[in-house]
Image (cartoon, helix red, strand yellow):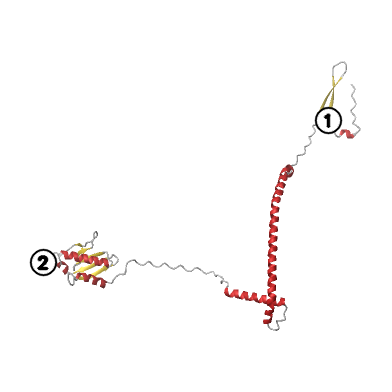
Amino acid sequence: MSQEPPLQPDANPSKTQNPPAVDASFEIVDTADSTDSLQVESTVEVEPVAAQPQPTARPVPPAARSPQVKSQTLQKLQQFLQIALPKVKAAAIAIYNATLYTLSLLRIGAQKFWAWWNRVLPSIRRLLPASLQTLPDVVLTGAIATLLLLLLWITTSLFFPKPPPQIATSPPPLASSPTPTSSTPAQPPIALIQDQVAEITNQYANGLVQSVQANFRASRLTVNVGEGWYGLSENQQSKLANDLLKRTQQLNFSKLELTDSEGTLVARSPVVGREMVILRSAKPQTMDDGMTG
């Protein structure tokens, strides 16, 4: 069997650089055919070509995306300027005219004043000393204006003095609250009370009142009567006790108690009602009194 000669490489190197590399192998198979024919099996492996990356699209700026928005903004700005500019122009013209009018009034006033001052200045110059009469009009006018300003400042300082600076002072101490005084009226002396009580009891019997005790805290007045109490009738005892109750209330006592010489309670002020309660109108008899009888 004869072998085919190997393939010769291409003499032109530029043609072998671009196409992909091909791995080709040839195998000669000997068949049993009598014709001695050659059967060639070939296996071709082709390497895949890497795909070239496509360029990414760049973001389009907003101005390029929306030219219509830009044109609308310009139109609105132009409309605003068309409305505002005439108004601004009219206001500027009005201010300019007012300024010119004011300046013209000042100029006319200054001219009138200067004409009047030129008439008055010679009279003032004659009143000055001889050394000052030769001063120019401008210098003399400036000196007089300075003197007038000085007099005005002094007058203002004298008649309108500045208020003194306020100095922070500590707040005054809180005044102590007055102690609450008792609402109870002035307490009369015991001697006066006893005289008041005796003035009533002497109408019934002389020397009936032995002593008087006053308890101002309990607002209670205790009158000690002698044996003459038992010598009075029940009507007289009741009337005497009620008269003493009225006088006691006038002396700012709310309770009244009558006791005898032994300290026994014979009458007291009522808890309910207005009449005195007579507890003992007669002296109880003792054993000695019964034996004597």
Residue ID at (68%, 72%): 113
Residue that sits furthest to the bottom in the current view: 130
Name which residue type carries label 2. Asp
Q: Position of residue 24 (x, y in %)?
A: 84, 28
The residue identified by callout 2 is 289
Which quadrant of the figure has residue 214?
Answer: bottom left
According to the picture, the residue beneath numbered tag 1 turns out to be 22
Above or below 3: residue 97: below
> What distance separates the C-alpha of mark 1 from that of mark 2?
172 Å
Q: Position of residue 5 (x, y in %)?
A: 90, 26
- Left or right position of 275 against 75: left
Q: Residue at x 65, y 75 (%)?
A: 148
Question: In which quadrant is the C terminus drawn?
Answer: bottom left
Judged left or right of residue 98, residue 246 is left
Question: From the image, which quarter does the N terminus lie in?
Answer: top right
Residue 84 left/right relative to 209: right
Asked if residue 264 can be seen in this view, the reply is: no
Q: Amino acid at mark 1?
A: Val
Of 223 and 203, nearer the camera is 203
**Classed neighbour count for the residue bearing mark 2: other residues with Cα under 10 Å, few (<14), some (14–19), many (≥20):** few
Counting from the top left corner in percent of width and height, residue 60 is at 74, 42
Residue 196 visible: yes
Q: Position of residue 271 (x, y in %)?
A: 24, 60
Q: Residue furthest top?
A: 34
Asked if 20 appears above or below 273 in the picture, the reply is above
Label 1 or label 2, whichever comes before in sequence order: 1
SS of the residue under disc 2: helix
The quadrant holding residue 14 is top right
Residue 105 appears left or right of 192: right
Task: Work out whether residue 161 or residue 82 is closer to the camera in this orientation and state it.
Answer: 82
Q: Secondary structure at mark 1?
A: strand
User: Which of 157/151 is in front?
Assistant: 151
